Amino acid sequence: MRFRLLIPSRFPFVLSSLPLSPERQDSATSSLGVALPHQSTAPVATATQERALSKTIGTAFAVVLSFLVLFLYSPSFVGPYVYDDIGHLRGNSTLDAFPPSLSWTRAETRPVVMATFALERALFGESPSVHRIGNVLIHILTAILLFVLVQSVARFSLSVDDEERSETNPSTNRDATALACLVALLWAVHPLNTQAVAYIIQRCESLMGLCFIVFLLMLVWHQQSEQRRWLIVAGIFFVIGLWSKTVMVTALAVGPLFDRAFLAADWRMVWKRRGWLYGVPLAASVVAVVTLLPGLLRGDANVGFGGDAPPALPHIAAQADIVFRYLGMSLFPIGLNIDHGLTVPQPWVQFLPQIMSALAVVISGFVAGYFGYWKLAFFLLAPLFILAPTSSFIPTADLLVEHRMYLPLACIVTGSVFGARLLARRLRHSGLPMTNRIHRPVRWVAISSLPIVMLFSWGTWSRAHDYQSGSRLWYRSLIENPANPRAAQNLVNTATEEISSEALMQLYVDALASAQQRALPTSIILGRIGEELVKANRAVEATQVLQRSIAGDPTQEDFANRFYPPSTREEYASHHINHALALMQLGRIDEAAADLEVAFRIHDQSPLARAIAGDLMQKAGNPESAIVHFQRALQLRPQWPEVQSQLNDLLSAEAP
């Protein structure tokens, strides 16, 4: 006897859920009049194979990326400690034992970073090479995690953006994997990241970046699985990142924005699912900022190489310009060096166009979010949020430091790759000539990016060589920033310790040749170097360098017949003043006096030149001329105790 299953046609979903064979589907359709979908295991198998292929590609990519990054940064492995590395790491007895005796209740001590240095020292001994290799391994791990994060986000984003796709669509998996590979590769080899990797003490930046990306990745995994453990892991890495560098606090702003842009359908879902992860530490951070705000506005706290931080308002104005400089270095990484030496020029209102442009970017981000374009809002606002602690109202002694772009660069690279893919897709359907050849937009973007990857790799390889010695590092900085006195000072200091006088002079010759090729003011570069050599009591080298500097200065006829701003005249006069000082150290008094006379003709408002002339006349046995020069120096600079004391001694000796 044969039975028939009678189910009303208004419940077709019941039949569609039954895994019938094709023959039974045809029978059921003919007998019930309900069209059943043709169920086959082929699409499922294909999707499974594609995911397995994506994992294989991801593993192979991680291996290739690791070897590539290790190769690019290998020139820096032989370098010594440089600059801040010396004070924090070389001979630091607190790192001799593991775990080190650090303050874990103060995030500004960066205990996690110092603990990793102590662990490396316990395992391999104190060595800058070991620490640099550790930095590179952290950078590689961060790049691999960035790949996983972008792949997960891209898989979901492509399935939403393209109606014909789904997350299980093989094409979606292939494109997501390709986009993730390209983003991670571009970011890993980008020259702008060199300072955060090869500069040992900046492990705080790369380690915080690793924790930041893990924090975002845990949000994705929680969205996929609804398991609370991933939020607990996110909270743990938030604390670790905060102990690495306090900029991690910006994850409390970037996290919800990332959540809304790529994971949640609306803000209510964001706060319903993960609100406690954002809310509790965010409230604590707001209280801390409000408490510290008065002191921050006064400039009581600053970040960077040290020195006096500018007031809050000029600092904010200057940072509007710095943000666009950061963007320029992200897209065109040229002129990179360890110390840009930028200061707040006066008046700061000259930055008004940059301020308006920065405000336009911020407003555009919020407007894009208001109209539902949250991905665009994320790529516009996330880099600014991460830069906010150092590019807003918190005064920093160093306005621009490259390692601060470690995380914002990841946002910029990801946004650029996603934007290029969207542009290629639009061109494909635009009907314009030649655009019909763009069959696979992602493949087109990847192939087009290969020259950029090669250029970035060469730039990173070149910059890694700079960290082979402190003198080479500061030589690059001085060439890029001739007016930076700190670069000249550190070049002389490091070169004195690392190389011989002959090698030092050859370095200056190379600097001169490089500056001439790039049409830089060579006389100013050499003048700064000569000044530092005088301070280091290296009179012989100073006279050689300053003679080259003076030879490149304008002639006396130029100064007599052409207009030069007072600051320019003062700069050129300083070359003769420092040359006179070097000659005095060598006992060549008459030549020094002649140089000072030239300095007076170029710029007669230099108190230093008058003070040096007074000292020279005193040593030459001419107290009357010395008194005149000292009095003139005090007129130009009234508060000068040393000169006032010399003048008083001379007046007392001349008194009857």
Image: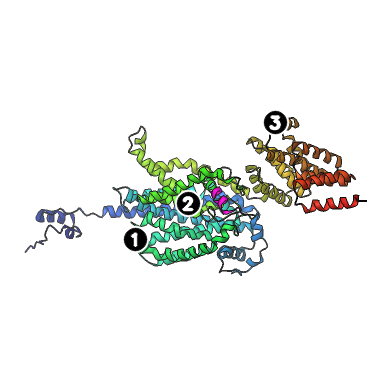
Residue 186, horizontal then vertical, whole percent: 48, 47
> Residue pushed farthest right?
656
Left or right: 450, with 432 as reference point: right
Nearer-N-terminus badge (3/1): 1
Q: Is residue 621 left or right of residue 490?
A: right
Residue assigned mark 2: 383
Residue drawn 53% across and 64% down? 291
Horizontal placement of 92 versus 234: left or right? right
Disc 2, disc 3: CB below 8 Å?
A: no
The kind of residue on which mark 1 rests is Met
Q: Which residue is mark 3?
A: 562
Q: Which range is magenta?
A: 308-319
Prevalent SS, magenta region: helix
For mark 1, give the secondary structure. helix
Q: Could one spot residue 439 in this view of the protein?
A: no
Crowding at label 1, few (<14), some or many (≥20) Cα neighbours within 10 Å?
A: some
Q: CA distance from mark 3 to mark 1?
A: 69 Å
Mark 2 / mark 3, whichever is N-terminal: 2
The type of colouring in the image is rainbow
Give the residue at mark 1. Answer: 269
Residue type highlighted by circle 2: Pro
